[in-house]
């Protein structure tokens, strides 16, 4: 087992870390740079994006022919962790959800003409995108077989009717990937489509208020009342919607974890700095055994998360779907992020509960981590299903050449 990274990946990591330190963190510290939803304002974002492009730090996750740097999943894990030392980091490098996952799946699944029409503008940072799958009750959520939104063939088009909700980034997105039902087949009943925000027959019902800060475009409820999508804008083939969803969500779940590890480390950084400066009852907080144990435990939990993420990233790079590995990473790192923010707030006391640091932002954001891209309980059921199928082989070591 080789836990070293290549000099090329280390070069990217170091340059990202410097860029975040010198360029992004000062903007994060300026409250005037925040929009009403707790994200970076567009007029502050675009100059940073221009600098990131200029330094070759743009879309690292995509192939060179697509406009990226060709990093594999292991390289992405290293770099995404460094990006998210700042709450504004990933979007600066065009590596934030949902564009990140949408670009990667379009790179894999779209036809050349579709890539030119739908992918290239996202890569260039000219438009934002969204992925519309989740539905309100009694429709599909973690169980896509319950999906009620329909796509009915009408000549050379599909007519879409139904409702989606908690669609991240929908407000202001231009390009959408939509998953809808084309038949009642339990395995081949869903299909995936591309549509443009300017097409008639759909609307944003509302931007759903949430507890935490929001990605650009929020989390929206969409209503489809006869949206017509040309058949040429179908991704893959009719009935391949579930396949497309699996292609997108596995890597996307893991990239969430990569970013959350960076936020968890930021929590520790803020907590350690304050504990080293603050005196109480004649003693520096950092010297108290209780504080040292809290920070030591967080350090261990973060490293466990890194190992889980790296194993999953390696497995994806080997061509595996890495379902077990991604589920384990998703559960552990989501809970870790919440614990890191909570612990850092506790160490900072009233300061942690204020908006003088980003800890409150991270704490509110962290609670959604245990829900997005599959709740903890869903992933644990996936793991138990694998355990029931594999028995003791659940823990087997892969053998070279196997």
Image (spheres, rainbow, N blue to C red):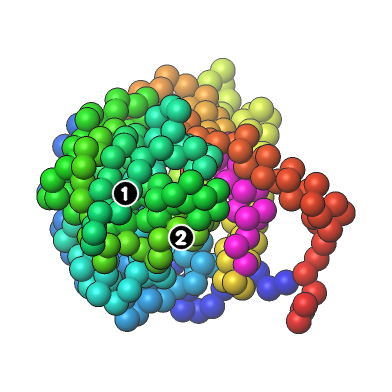
Q: Residues within 10 Å of mark 2 (few under 14, many from 20)?
A: some
Query: Which stretch did the figure color magenta?
Result: 320-335
The residue positioned 50% from the left and 43% from the top of the image is 144
Q: Nearer the viewer, residue 105 or 183?
A: 183
Q: Does any portion of residue 52 appear in the rendered image? A: no
Front-lying residue, 318 or 338: 318
Q: Which mark is residue 240?
A: 2
Residue 182: x %, y % from top left: 40, 50
- Which quadrant of the figure contains the N terminus? bottom right
Q: CA distance from mark 1 to mark 2?
A: 15 Å
- Could you say which disc has been placed on residue 152 in the image? 1
Residue occupying image coordinates x 48% and y 31%: 367
- Residue situated in front as seen by the camera: 75 or 327: 327
The mark nearer the N terminus, 1 or 2, is 1
For label 1, the crowd category at 10 Å Cα-Cα, with few meaning under 14, some 14 to 19 and many 20 or more, is some
Q: Is residue 270 above or below residue 69?
A: above
Mark 1, secondary structure of its residue: strand
Which picture quadrant has residue 238? bottom left
- Residue at 62% over, 42% down: 379
The tag on residue 277 is none
Is disc 1 in contact with disc 2, using a CB cutoff of under 8 Å?
no
What percent of the width, then of the height, locates residue 281?
A: 56, 18
SS type, badge 2: loop
Q: Please provide percent x and percent y for residue 164.
A: 34, 37
Q: Dividing the image into 4 quarters, which one contains the C terminus?
A: bottom right
**In this rendering, would 391 be left or right of 320?**
right
- Nearer to us in this view, 253 or 257: 253
Number of marks in picture: 2
Give the vertical position of 148 relative to 15 (above or below).
above
Whether residue 89 appears in magenta in the rendering, the answer is no
Q: Chief secondary structure of the magenta span?
A: helix
Residue 342: percent from left, percent from top: 52, 28
């Amino acid at each position: 087992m080789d836990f070293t990274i290549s000099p090329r990946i280390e070069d990217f990591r170091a340059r990202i870390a410097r860029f975040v330190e010198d360029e992004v963190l000062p903007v994060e510290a300026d409250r005037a740079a925040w929009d009403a939803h707790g994200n970076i304002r567009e007029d502050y974002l675009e100059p940073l994006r221009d600098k990131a492009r200029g330094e070759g730090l743009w879309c690292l996750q995509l192939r060179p022919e697509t406009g990226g740097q060709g990093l594999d999943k292991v390289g992405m894990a290293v770099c995404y962790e460094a990006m998210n030392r700042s709450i504004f980091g990933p979007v600066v490098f065009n590596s934030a959800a949902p564009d990140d996952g949408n670009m990667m799946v379009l790179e894999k699944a779209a036809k050349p003409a579709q890539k030119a029409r739908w992918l290239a503008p996202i890569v260039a940072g000219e438009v934002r995108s969204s992925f519309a799958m989740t539905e309100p009750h009694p429709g599909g959520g973690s169980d896509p077989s319950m999906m009620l939104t329909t796509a009915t063939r009408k000549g050379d088009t599909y007519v879409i009717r139904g409702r989606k909700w908690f669609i991240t980034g929908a407000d202001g997105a231009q390009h959408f990937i939509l998953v809808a039902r084309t038949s009642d087949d339990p395995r081949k009943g869903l299909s995936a489509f591309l549509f443009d925000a300017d097409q008639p027959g759909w609307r944003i019902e509302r931007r759903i208020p949430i507890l935490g800060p929001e990605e650009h475009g929020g989390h929206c409820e969409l209503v489809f009342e006869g949206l017509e999508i040309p058949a040429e804008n179908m991704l893959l083939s009719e009935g391949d919607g579930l396949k497309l969803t699996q292609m997108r969500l596995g890597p996307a779940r893991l990239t969430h974890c990569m970013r959350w590890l960076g936020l968890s480390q930021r929590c520790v950084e803020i907590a350690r700095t304050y504990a080293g400066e603050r005196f109480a009852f004649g003693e520096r907080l950092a010297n108290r055994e209780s504080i040292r144990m809290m920070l030591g435990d967080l350090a261990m939990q973060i490293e466990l998360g890194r190992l889980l993420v790296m194993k999953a990233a390696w497995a994806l790079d080997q061509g595996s779907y890495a379902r077990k590995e991604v589920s384990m990473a998703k559960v552990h790192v989501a809970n870790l992020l919440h614990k890191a923010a909570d612990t850092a707030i506790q160490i900072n006391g009233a300061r942690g509960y204020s908006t003088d640091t980003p800890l409150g932002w991270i704490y509110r954001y962290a609670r959604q981590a245990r829900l997005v891209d599959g709740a903890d309980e869903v992933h644990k059921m996936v793991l138990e299903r694998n355990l029931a199928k594999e028995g003791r082989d659940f823990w087997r070591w892969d053998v070279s050449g196997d």
